[in-house]
Image (cartoon, rainbow, N blue to C red):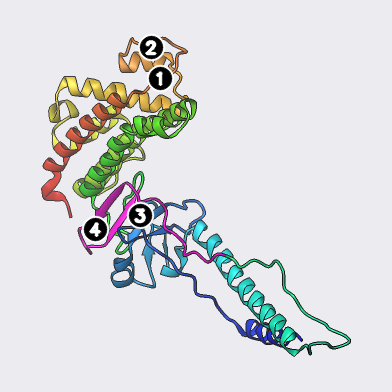
Amino acid sequence: MFKNLQKELRRLAELQQVEVPLEGDAEGYVDKECPAEACLFQFKIHGDDWKNIVRDEEVFCPSCRHTAPAKSWYTTAQIEAAKQYALGTVVNRLNGAMRADAQASKRRQKRGAFLSITLDVKGGRDAVLVPIAAAEPMRLRTICEDCGCRYSYVGAAYFCPSCGKNSASHTFLQTLATIRTAAGLGETLRSALSPDEAEVMTRALLEKAMQDTVTSFQRLAEQLYEARAGKPARRNAFQNLDAGSELWEAELGASYEQLLDAVAVKGLRVYYQQRHLLAHQQGIVDSDYVSRSGDTSYQVGQRLIIKGSAVLEFADLVERLGTALLARCAPAQK
């Protein structure tokens, strides 16, 4: 009576793998995730480039530069969906075998017989096997200047996933582009979320953008300084405006005020100090902030309020400073 089910169970016992379809987004980009537990950075890479440019034996995380074979870069969501897809495949095959047995049982019954036994299969609804969909398209797309690999990400990324190259100027400008995008998302969030949720999310994005702006310049300055001086700067020197300016004055003969102007540096000083408060004081104003920034619009104990316009101005000032350094260091870049 259970001949088809027994056959299917034997087939399943021999089954080694189930192919799970992976689809890219509308533009052909496929989701990937860094396998390093401390990172788990998510990004996208164009499906054609994943097949034709990226090497099977080595892929680089755009954020932390962790390396691993190509088979290691499935996202957590893809792995979970693949498990459900595989389970659904098994369930469907068992359901099909049991239905076939039920139909065979009914055909064997003689009409008018004294004893009639029938097998009916109820329930066991087939799983809906939908290909794993790519997540919402990432905001920023880029092309590696060295190998031509196309990839995308949200936030800050520093390395090409295919060749691992880090272009100081390209990364700097791309990161500032994402920061400017974050500064303008307030209206979009307000139309999609409740007022309270939108307010919390907007504030978090703006405060993160202030910190990312300093990080983007720090990464650029560290690379340029090491290429120029032949040695790395001391740790986190370029998170501090005065320390960074002194290093460049010794190396280039030009301080930040000479690369920009006094007004621009005054604005940078306020924003750098605000970033320091957000990173170390949860945004609560202390006496050091007031004395070092010269910002008298806050009193000690108040919390910073970051506006989108401030993020945009900060990004513009940092881009001016970074561009000036790139111009001075151009002959020394490798």
Report, in whole angstroms, how far the alpha carbon at label 4 lies from the one at label 1: 38 Å
Q: Secondary structure at mark 1?
A: loop
Looking at the image, is mark 1 or mark 3 earlier in the sequence? Answer: 3
Mark 3 and mark 2 lie on one chain; the one further toward the N terminus is 3
* Marks 4 and 2 close (CB-CB < 8 Å): no
Label 3 sits on a secondary structure element that is loop
Measure how far apart labels 3 and 4 are at the Cα level: 11 Å
- Check the picture and name the quadrant holding the C terminus: bottom left
Residue at left offset 39%, top offset 50% = 136
- In the rendered image, residue 219 lying in the magenta stretch gets the answer no
Q: CA distance from mark 3 to mark 2?
A: 38 Å
Q: Secondary structure at mark 4?
A: loop
Task: Please name the residue that numbered disc 3 is placed on.
Answer: 62
- The magenta region covers 128-153
Which labelled disc corresponds to residue 304? Answer: 1
Badge 3: residue crowd in 10 Å (few <14, some 14–19, many ≥20): many
In depth, the one of 25 and 250 nearer the eye is: 25
Disc 4 residue type? Cys
Label 2–label 1 contact, CB within 8 A: yes
Q: Earlier in the sequence, mark 4 or mark 2?
A: 4
Task: Name the residue that disc number 4 marks.
Answer: 144
Amino acid at pointer 3: Pro
Residue nearer the viewer, 267 or 49: 49
Category of crowding for the residue at label 1, using alpha-carbon neighbours closer than 10 angstroms: few (below 14), some (14–19), many (at least 20): some
Q: Is 138 part of what is drawn in magenta? A: yes
The quadrant the N terminus occupies is bottom right
CB-based contact (under 8 Å), mark 3 and mark 4 = no
